[in-house]
Amino acid sequence: MTMRDTDRALVQAATAVVKLRCRSDRHTVATAARTADGRVFTGVNVRHASGGACAELVAVGAAATQGVTDLETMVTVGDRGREVLAPCHRCRQLLRDHFPSLRLIVGPLDALRVAPIADLSPGTGVPAAGTPTP
């Protein structure tokens, strides 16, 4: 799928959040999610020895608190210069179950692309969030 201007703006939103809010080991990833009507919700991961919460799930929860039941597009960005990250297996499953038509922005910064959540399953070669990229 082709990247739209609104997709590039969503990457910028996630990048701004990661730069502003991810300054410790507790928060290392930021997600921005957009609704079809253009509202944007963000979240950061919460790391903890007990497991913590991924940024994607925090963004979904933030949207839910505002009554949002459907998300159109999502992107996750790593801190400290890391690139755009695909959701982990657990988040992919949750996103696929709750938002089957969700578009995810994935890939290296110089070659970002949009992929339907249905196309990103374990074993597709798209690295999950937190996985070191080659």
Image (cartoon, helix red, strand yellow):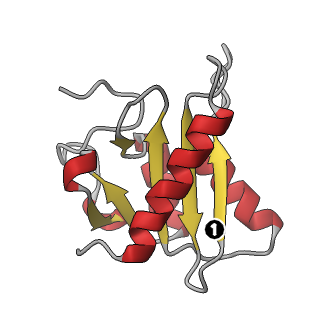
Compare residues 123 and 24 and report the one nearer the observer. Answer: 24
29 above or below 33? above
66 above or below 58? below
What residue is shown at x 57% (from left), y 47% (from top)?
16
For the N terminus, the quadrant is bottom left
- Badge 1: residue crowd in 10 Å (few <14, some 14–19, many ≥20): some
Q: Position of residue 62 (x, y in %)?
A: 74, 58
Residue labelled with disc 1: 40
Q: Where is residue 113 in the image (x, y as percent from the top left)?
A: 25, 62
Q: What element carries label 1?
A: strand
Compare residues 65 and 10 and report the one nearer the observer. Answer: 10
1 above or below 20? below
Query: How many numbered markers are drawn?
Result: 1
What residue is shown at x 46% (from left), y 25% (from top)?
80
What residue is shown at x 45% (from left), y 43% (from top)?
77
Q: Is residue 85 visible?
A: yes
Going by the picture, which residue comes out furthest to the top? 49
Q: Where is residue 105 in the image (x, y as percent from the top left)?
A: 35, 59
Q: Give the image quarter of residue 37.
A: bottom right
Q: Give the image quarter of residue 18.
A: top right
Q: Can residue 101 be seen in this view?
A: no
Compare residues 97 and 19 and report the one nearer the observer. Answer: 19
127 above or below 95? above
Q: Give the image quarter of residue 82.
A: top left
Residue type highlighted by circle 1 = Val
